[in-house]
Image (tube, rainbow, N blue to C red):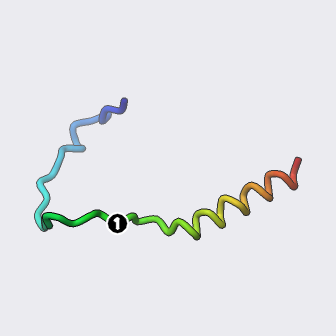
Amino acid sequence: FFAPEDDQNTPRIAEDLQLSQGMVESSNVDSVKEMVRMIEANRAYTTMQ
């Protein structure tokens, strides 16, 4: 696990907080785009072998 090296990294209280009950958090990742990037990386890796 990680620990801060100095005492400068103190936690802050959130100022602008919004809580919505019954809601589902959406992903911040575009799954199709990331799948394409993974396929491209795999092809590049295979080509270089």
Question: Is 48 on the left-hand or right-hand side of 21?
Answer: right
- The quarter holding residue 17 reads bottom left
Question: How many numbered markers are drawn?
Answer: 1
- Name the residue rendered at 71%, 60% in the picture: 39
Q: Quick check: 7 above or below 32?
A: above
- Name the residue rendered at 27%, 64% in the picture: 24
Question: Is 30 on the left-hand or right-hand side of 45?
Answer: left
Point out residue 45 in the picture as x, y percentages from the top left corner: 79, 52
- The quarter holding residue 1 reads top left
Point out residue 28 in the picture as x, y percentages from the top left corner: 40, 65
In this figure, which residue is indicated by the disc labeled 1? 26
Question: Is 16 on the left-hand or right-hand side of 7?
Answer: left
Point out residue 47 in the picture as x, y percentages from the top left corner: 87, 55
Q: Nearer the viewer, residue 4 or 39?
A: 39
- Name the residue rendered at 75%, 55% in the picture: 42
Q: Nearer the viewer, residue 47 or 5?
A: 47
- Name the residue rendered at 46%, 65% in the picture: 29
Q: Quick check: 49 above or below 43?
A: above
Question: Is 19 on the left-hand or right-hand side of 39?
Answer: left
Inspect the image, locate mark 1, and give the three-letter code of the amino acid beneath it. Ser
Residue at the outermost front position = 22
Q: Quick check: 12 above or below 21?
A: above
- The quarter holding residue 43 reads bottom right
